[in-house]
């Protein structure tokens, strides 16, 4: 739980200004909550309880994709 804003608001506000990966970690487990999370800009939606090793694996997967994106953007063709 967040003290001032809910996760939906935080996700929307981040997405307005940035394309950083967003992983929502939440206790909301209904299908419509998960779909809503993706619709407002989340890249992944993880329902609690979650095993720490699984969460770390998801985060590492995002980092791998970010690294690949940097490499792909730097490739010159001619």
Image (cartoon, rainbow, N blue to C red):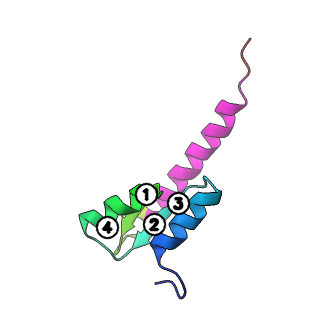
The residue beneath circle 4 is 33
Mark 4 or mark 3, earlier in chain: 3
* Residue 55 found in image quarter: bottom left
- Residue drawn at (57%, 59%) of the image: 15
Mark 1 or mark 4, earlier in chain: 4
The CA distance from mark 1 to mark 4 is 12 Å
Q: From this viewpoint, which residue is outermost toward the left?
A: 31
The residue beneath circle 1 is 44
The residue beneath circle 3 is 22
- Residue 20 higher or lower than 30, as above or below: above
Residue 72 among those drawn in magenta? yes
The CA distance from mark 4 to mark 2 is 11 Å
Q: Are marks 3 and 2 in contact (CB under 8 Å)?
A: yes
Q: Are marks 4 and 3 in contact (CB under 8 Å)?
A: no
The residue beneath circle 2 is 24
Which region shows up in magenta? 55-75
Q: Nearer the viewer, mark 4 or mark 3?
A: 4
Mark 2 or mark 1, earlier in chain: 2
Q: Are marks 1 and 3 in contact (CB under 8 Å)?
A: yes
On-image quarter of the C terminus = top right
């Amino acid at each position: 739980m967040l003290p001032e804003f809910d996760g939906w608001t935080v996700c929307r506000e981040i997405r307005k200004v940035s394309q950083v990966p967003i992983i929502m970690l939440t206790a909301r487990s209904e299908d419509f909550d998960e779909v809503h999370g993706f619709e407002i800009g989340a890249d992944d939606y993880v329902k609690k309880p979650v095993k720490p090793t699984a969460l770390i694996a998801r985060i590492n997967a995002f980092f791998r994709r970010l690294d690949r994106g940097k490499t792909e953007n730097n490739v010159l063709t001619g």
